[in-house]
Each structure stands twice: as C-alpha cells, then as structure tokens.
Image: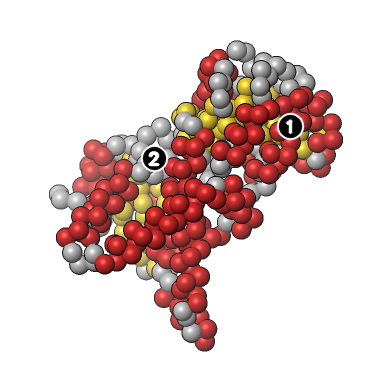
Amino acid sequence: MMIKEISIIGMGFTGSSLGLALKQYLPDVIITGIDKGSVLIRARNIGALDKGCIYEEIEQGLKDADLVIFAATIRTVEELLPKVSKAVKKNAIVTDTCNTKTEIAALAQTLFVDKASFIGGHPVIGYKRGGIEQADPLLFVNVTYVLTPVGRSNQGAVSALENVVGSIGATAIIMSPGEHDNLNCVLNHMLQLMAIAQVNTMISGLDTEKDETSVALAGERFKQFAEALLTPSYFWGEIFESNRSILEKNVDRFVEYLKKLSREVGSGEFDEKYKKAREFVRKVPVATKGFNSTLFDIYVSIEDETGAIAKLTSLIASKAFNIRDIGIVKIKEGETAVLRIAFSNQSTASKAGSFLIKNGYNCRTQYDYEEFCI
C-alpha cells in the first residue's frame, strides 16, 4: 500500500514533531495538519505541514488521506473518532499516539467495520515539555513504537504503518491493546502513582516548621525518583482514568508485595529479591540520544578550571578514542567536577580509561564506579 498523503490531527509538540520527521524522511508525502487556525500557522512556520485544515472543516482535511494520525489526547480521540471513521477513504489507515489503547480500541472496533483500518499506536517518547517551536524531527529516532491492531486489521495496512514508523527512525513492536496497557501500567503508570503516594506520605509525616531541613536532606536520589511529579497532573488524569481497572489490580498486588518484602528485610529472601531486581534494571537500555546501540561510559574527575575539559578531550583525541557523548555529572564549583564520557563499545571505554589513569586522571566505570586496573 502506497502512502502519499498523511493527515495529522493535533499539531502541538508531538504532532509537529511527526510532521517534521515525515517531511525529512518521506519528503514526497503531503502532510495536512488539522487543528485550530492559530496552531496551524505556527506549525506551517516551522515547516511541519504542507496544508492546514481547521477542526470545523475536518472532513475536508481527511478526504484524500491515506494515513490519519491522531496526535491528541485520549478524550479528543474518542470525541473525534466517529466523525473521522465516516470521513476517511475505505482503504485508509487511522492510528493514534495515545498512552493507553484498550478504550480507544473498543470504540474503534465498533466504528471501523468494513471501512478503513484502525491500528492503535504509542511512540514511547515519555512526556516532553515544549511547544510547537520546540518540535524535533529526531524525536522518534531509536524509540520503541507500539502498534496495536484492532480486530481483523488488514495485514497490508499494518505493514504500511510499520514502514512509516521505521522511516522516522522508530522500531515498531506489535501487541494487543490489553497487553500494551498492562505492561505500560506496570512499567510506567505505577511509577507515577508510587511517586505521588510516597511524596505525599512523606509530607504528611513532616513537621511543617522543618520543611527547609527536609528539602535540604532530599538528595539527588530523591529528586530523580520524584522528577516524574514535574509532569502536569492533567497529563496523567485521563491516562489513569482510561486504565483504571488494570491500575487498581496492580496497586493491590504491589501493596501486598511491599508488605511481604518489608517483613523479609534482613533475610536471605530479601537479598535474593534485591539481586533479581538489580539484574533486571541493568538489562533496561539507557537513552541513546539517537545512537544505534548502547554506549559505554567512564566517569572522570577533573579540576574545575578554565580549559580543563578541552585539555581532557584533546588528550583522548590524541589516541584516536572517539567520544560519542559527554556531560557534567557533578561539580563542586571552583574545585572539582565529574564528567561522564561515553564510547561506542566496552573495549574503547576500557582502553581510554586506562590511558587516562596513566596520565594522572581518576576514572571509574559506569556501573559500580570501581577504578580501572592499569
């Protein structure tokens, strides 16, 4: 199936990023954006669409589309899906980018009977802060993009959508809507709910007169755990609501397991479960920033002074060790800083670390921070 025209419903950050990615990697495809007039102007200004259509004339923006992508909220998709199902061509593909799939899939199954194919979609990009002007054509590179076909979805349509997903740099994974929502609840939604519960439990037990002391005691580990709460509550409200039954089952299961685990502290069973959890987390790939494979890090301590980073990177370059990523992890202003330096493979990272140690630098590995052996 050839896809020549794509309509994107919702031209905010995600929709405009999709538009930019599609324009970059499928330049011959015509992109029609559907949104409010003011939003369409901004999306056109950054090159995210070829044509624009306001919501009030949505049928006009859908009539020639081979693929329709909802880059909108769950409730917006549910509200507009009946109108979209009537307006699209019979052989068109309709998909979404929402965080939960079961509710929308159930609705789509009643609407797309002997009509266009509906295939749920979820690019696992997390919550990204930013407006239309911050849209990024590389947003989907090396991202897992879940596809959840509904009912007897046309296999040709599934393959065509897989090709589009692959063209923007993402990796398509196919599963059922229910399987997606259960996994997403365990891996994502539960973490958000746990952060809300933990922080509010902590707050309720604090002496309000000692808030400043408590904040000062909250170190980097607490901040990383609670960072999810910086996401606006409205973003999560409809996600939790649409996945309520699965969420409640997992909350009950977690509470029982937590009670059992607390009773096992200090026992061999606790140690085994700790090791098991640690090993699982180590298998989870880190963010690759668009690199095609996992990077290998070393941590290097340097003096916080002018030219220190340039001196270090020049030394690494003198031995032709290719740095793939670099960043400051921690700094004590005016004294020392710790840099994270990433390489494409473990061998290069080890050789670079040994070389730097020989030249007087303090280096540590990415997992346990042990010094390299010379």
Q: Give residue 141's position: percent from left, percent from top.
A: 50, 34
Residue at 25 percent of width and 56 percent of height: 274
Q: Residues within 10 Å of mark 2 (few under 14, many from 20)?
A: few
Residue 142 drawn above or below residue 184: above
Q: Residues within 10 Å of mark 1 (few under 14, many from 20)?
A: some
Q: Give residue 43's position: percent from left, percent from top.
A: 73, 37
Residue at 25 percent of width and 50 percent of height: 276
Q: Is residue 302 visible?
A: no
Does residue 273 appear to the left or right of 198 in the view shown?
Answer: left
Q: Amino acid at mark 2?
A: Arg
Q: Mark 1 against mark 2, which lies toward the viewer?
A: 1
Q: Amino acid at mark 1?
A: Pro
Residue 295 sits in which quadrant?
top left
Q: Give residue 173's position: percent from left, percent from top.
A: 46, 29
Q: Earlier in the sequence, mark 1 or mark 2?
A: 1
Residue on which the image places disc 2: 324
Residue on which the image places disc 1: 82
Residue 339 drawn above or below residue 12: below
Q: Nearer the viewer, residue 263 or 295?
A: 263
Residue at 75 percent of width and 19 percent of height: 64
Q: Nearer the viewer, residue 336 or 164?
A: 164
Q: Nearer the viewer, residue 140 or 194?
A: 194
Q: Nearer the viewer, residue 110 or 135?
A: 110
- Callout 1: SS: helix
